[in-house]
Image: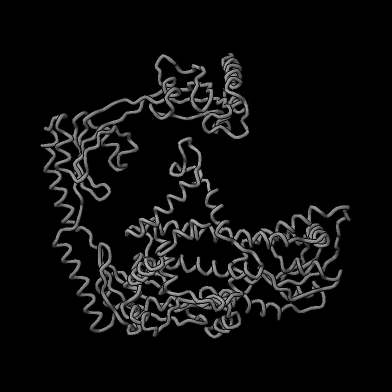
Amino acid sequence: MAILSKIREKTSILILIVGLALLAFVVNPKDIYDFFTSKKGNSVGSIDGETISRTEMGQAVEAYKAGRQGVSQTQAVDAVWNSLVSEKIYAKQLKEAGIVIGENDVWKAIVNMPAVQQSPLFKNEAGLFNEEKLKEYIANLQSDAKNGNSAGWYNWLNTERNVKQSLERTEYNNLVKSIIGASIEEGKRKYYFENTKMNADYVYVPYSSIKDEEVSVTDADIQAYISAHAAQYQVGNGRDIEYVKFDIKPSAEDIKNINAKVAGFINELKETKDSDISLFVNETSDINYNDNLLYKSQVPSAVADTIFNLPLNGVYGPYDDAGYSKISKVVAIEDVPEVKSSHILIAYEGAQRANPDVTRTKEEAEKEAQKVLAEAKKRDADFAALAMKYSDGPSANKGGDLGWNKDGVMVPAFNDFTFDEKNKVGTIDLVETPFGFHVIKIDDRKAEKAIKLATIALTIEPSEETENKIFEDAELFASKVSENGNFDEIAKEKGFKVNPADGLDIINDNVPGLGSQRLIVNWAFNEDTNIGATNRFDVEKGYVVVKLSGITEKGLAKASSVASEVRPIVMKEKKAELLKAKMNGATLEEIASSNGVTVKKVAAVTCASPAISGVGTEPAVVGAMSTAKLDQVFSNVVGEKGVFAFKVTKREEPADIKNYTSYTDQETKKLQARTGQIFNALKETSNVEDNREALYK
């Protein structure tokens, strides 16, 4: 696609400059210096030996952020990294598979996107999509970028990149999917697996028969389990902190003073004429005058009953609401009509929102509607049943019920009919709208009380004295813990709440309970910050005093960090060993007797439904039953809920069937559904080196 090549000319320098400027916000000056002097190299990572440079990263981050409001720098870096990893992993696979996604493929995909086809920007005078207008639009974006307005251009580059990645993923996944399938033999095996029934006698000794306190699980046991399952318990560099937050919020005295100030406007609000009320409110209040009628549900629930019982010109307040101290005057009271109606929509081809399967013409629709209208007007007609039978509208399954609606909600013709007071409750008639022909029934009418309020609201905010005191409290606490290091003791003494935030990640600026806090994360990971170090930080609407409480090194997790997860697993394993040692005896009766339980029976259990009555789902146990020799005792079978011994007394295989195609198809679909896991599998087998941490140190 020549146009894409043209509009990229001479933009690399601009993108490089913007990309470097972008990275300056997430790295310190020393990193920028190291970048140019090559002390750390020009890499943020690699995939199978292919380097991702800082330049490439910077360009991609800038493109990602274009048009995305509220995305933090670290969020953008994280998203871009994942995208680049995906892109390069798939690029390698596509190359090996001989699949090429070219510029022309990307361009065709973009041109055929509904958002592009339907955009007024790319339509000609006849209202049809014009490819040349799209090319002109892109060229203008590039021109704007040269003149300093690069957001649109980067947004376009990001769109193009995403489309290409989507095409690559789809093409590769479809290729893999096309070669995945199950054989007839596998379909047959599935048939037998699901339908072979087993009867068995069994002995079950639950893990709960051994109390937890009778089993000793040490840190060494937990660490041994972690080591044995090392791949599952790898961790990155992490930091644990504790913090005390000092919120800048108004004191009780501040609230009292603001309420008094608001109360001082009561008499003036009472005496102000209706013609001057909006001007008075706008000059006095922190919230402008609202001239709309309000229903009870739109007034703060805590005061709604009181305010709705006020007479005309009555005043209530001060009251607190959503951070404001308020007084309100009732300046109007009205009864607003509402109508409950039902309808039967007869749509036609070309009508607004008509379903694709509606093929009748407008004339045929009107004729059909007249027929339905006649049926609906019969004395014994069931309107709801007719709606369910004939209506093309989404309310058909509710008998055409549209519920209660206020004036102006429905389309004009529908609205005019239902709110015409001449149409009494029970009236049924035909109305045409852009959606088709409606057979409408007026089910009920009512009026709901609504009021208009003149409200003076002043923001409840802390005074300067309060802000100073909070700052002093934070400073004093920070000073004391800095002197003697007794963070928790001093916090307890002062009545301050200590909040833990474990597992901070250097490439994620989120601190649990505080939100995005890059400064705190950088401090915690600074090589000069040792365990026990403290510092004070400014945060939105407050201050925090932070203590570094723990450091986790990259590698195998420590027992203390995953003990809550691993301890129950190890305890279960230890209980299983204790129970297996008690499974003594040559017969089920002897084994049951030695454990103080009885022999039980299970009938017609299958591997597809491995539920044992009175125990629960036990796939491993039932799986063992499926291959066990008949009438032979098997013991020490470890299950989900306990340890088993069993003897299969009967195995009933299903009758052969002529065709196993349906089971083969089920297996094929099951296998093909796993194509969504392809990327994770490819990533696990790829050599991904993530050096993004260097950007933040």
Q: Position of residue 464 (x, y in %)?
A: 14, 61
Tell me if I can see residue 455 in this picture: yes
Colour mapping: one colour
Q: Position of residue 591 (x, y in %)?
A: 77, 75
Q: Position of residue 432 (x, y in %)?
A: 50, 21
Asked where in the image residue 596 lies, by quadrant, the reply is bottom right
Vertical placement of residue 216 versus 630, above or below: below
Asked where in the image residue 277 lies, by quadrant, the reply is top left
Tell me if I can see residue 196 in this picture: no
Vertical placement of residue 255 versus 570, above or below: above
Nearest the eye: 345 or 42: 42
User: Residue visible at 40% across and 65% down?
Assistant: 10
Quadrant in which the C terminus appears: bottom left
Side (left or right) of 449 relative to 348 = left
Nearest the eye: 145 or 211: 145
User: Residue visible at 57% across and 19% down?
Assistant: 366
Side (left or right) of 184 relative to 138 = right
Asked where in the image residue 672 lies, by quadrant, the reply is bottom right
Q: Position of residue 639 (x, y in %)?
A: 69, 70
Total label count?
0
